[in-house]
């Protein structure tokens, strides 16, 4: 049973992709893209999900929404669309919904894709793109949908005239605003923002991030904000989860995580945050080697081959997630003895 302030909770979420070889395409292994993820998103909050490219962030977001069917685990979500009596909604296991129920769930949860060009049909005018969720769900008649599209375009800072244009006629920032408008069409309560600003220039990034914050305050939205830019994550997030090789290794409030990390991988990520100073003389932590393959992850702690603090226990025994401070959890054997540096200490000369 979910607490009243929790909108979504994943437990033991796994998504494995089979690897096939040979003439008969036999399965010879699995890529463990998401390997036992536990996380929760509260009503109206933004949970940032960070980590290196290929660590499983986007796959996690898509599995939470059932764009990908999870291999194992459960995703409990408080759905209004599937509730017969309204109110706070009914708690459903997203991973076990049938096709009809999963379609109805789209009224509660939507996604903003990373690439604002490839995620929009180049043959459809903007008005049809934004109205498509309404049409698919059978919501409103054609005239009402037209009014709804005009309201959505206005909400994301565009004019109603943009409804007649095509995606190639708009800038990257405008196209991403169209993606946001489409995600808002059905009044969802939860949105997965899958690196929504990584394809945009810096000034446009700031505009889109501010727009997402304004919409959240106005509509009470909850976000899973997936990104690799920690500066953006720090600006928009309430809590942050750090992911490595398909696993969550640390979760904390945004200030706690940036100022007092408890996992060595988090410390390394924070040291890579760019500083707009050509004379910057702070500390850069360079991890040894490349990230291991998610098809054959190392034994014990998945980070131990690259960790400067690793011991024999780290290679032999997998650590468990445990609370190290109020609202701050980490998965590290040496969490009690390490004195890791946050962004302020790392930037000190």
Image (spheres, rainbow, N blue to C red):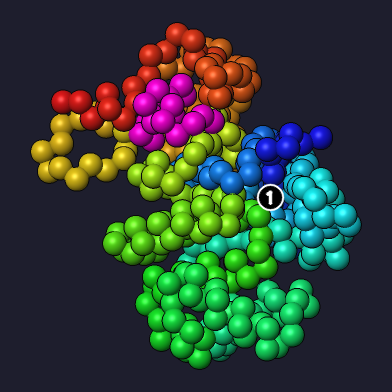
Furthest-top residue in this view: 337
Q: Position of residue 293 (x, y in %)?
A: 55, 41
Classify residue 189 by image quadrant.
Answer: bottom right
Magenta residues, dominant SS class:
helix
Above or below, comparing residue 127 to residue 134 in the picture: below
Quadrant for the C terminus, please.
Answer: top left
Asked if the magenta segment contains residue 267, the reply would be yes
Indicate the position of residue 154 as horizontal and vertical percent values. Answer: 48, 75
| Total tally of numbered discs in the picture | 1
Q: Is residue 80 magenta?
A: no
Q: Nearest the camera: 297 or 120?
A: 120
Q: Is residue 112 left or right of residue 172?
A: right
Q: Nearer the viewer, residue 1 or 142?
A: 142
Across and down, in percent, residue 80 comes to: 78, 55
Residues drawn in magenta = 251-270
The residue closer to the viewer here, 224 or 67, is: 224
> Eyeballing the image, is 148 above or below 109?
below
Kindly identify which residue carries mark 1: 64
Q: What residue is at 68 percent from the left and 89 percent from the top?
A: 143
**Callout 1: SS:** helix
Between 8 and 36, which is closer to the camera in this rendering? 8
Place residue 119 in its image quadrant: bottom right
Question: Residue 113: horizontal and vertical position, in percent?
Answer: 54, 63
User: Which image quarter holds the N terminus?
Assistant: top right
Q: Left or right of 348: which side holds 255?
A: right
Q: Residue at x 23, y 42 (%)?
A: 275
């Amino acid at each position: 049973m979910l607490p009243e302030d929790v909108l979504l909770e994943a437990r033991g979420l796994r998504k494995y992709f089979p690897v096939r070889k040979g003439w008969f395409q036999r399965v010879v292994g699995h890529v463990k893209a998401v390997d036992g993820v536990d996380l929760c998103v509260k009503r109206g909050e933004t949970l940032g999900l960070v980590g290196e490219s290929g660590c499983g962030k986007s796959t996690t977001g898509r599995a939470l929404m059932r764009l990908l069917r999870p291999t194992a685990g459960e995703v409990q979500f408080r759905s209004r669309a599937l509730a017969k009596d309204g109110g706070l909604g009914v708690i459903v296991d997203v991973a076990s919904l049938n096709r009809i129920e999963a379609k109805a769930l789209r009224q509660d949860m939507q996604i903003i894709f990373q690439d604002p060009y490839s995620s929009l049909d180049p043959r459809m005018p903007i008005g049809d793109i934004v109205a498509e969720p309404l049409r698919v769900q059978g919501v409103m008649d054609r005239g009402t949908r037209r009014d709804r599209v005009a309201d959505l375009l206005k909400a994301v800072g565009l004019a109603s005239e943009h409804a007649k244009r095509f995606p190639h006629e708009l800038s990257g920032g405008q196209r991403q605003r169209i993606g946001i408008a489409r995600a808002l069409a059905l009044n969802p309560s939860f949105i997965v923002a899958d690196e929504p600003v990584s394809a945009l220039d810096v000034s446009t990034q700031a505009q889109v991030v501010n727009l997402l914050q304004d919409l959240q305050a106005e509509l009470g939205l909850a976000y899973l904000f997936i990104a690799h830019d920690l500066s953006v994550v720090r600006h928009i997030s309430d809590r942050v989860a750090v992911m490595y090789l398909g696993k969550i290794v640390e979760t904390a409030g945004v200030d706690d995580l940036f100022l007092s990390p408890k996992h060595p991988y988090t410390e390394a990520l924070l040291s890579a945050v760019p500083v707009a100073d050509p004379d910057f003389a702070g500390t850069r932590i360079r991890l040894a080697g490349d990230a291991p393959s998610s098809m054959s992850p190392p034994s014990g702690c998945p980070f131990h081959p690259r960790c400067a603090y690793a011991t024999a226990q780290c290679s032999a025994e997998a650590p468990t997630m445990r609370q190290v401070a109020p609202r701050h959890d980490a998965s590290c054997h040496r969490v009690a003895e390490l004195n890791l540096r946050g962004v302020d200490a790392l930037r000190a000369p």
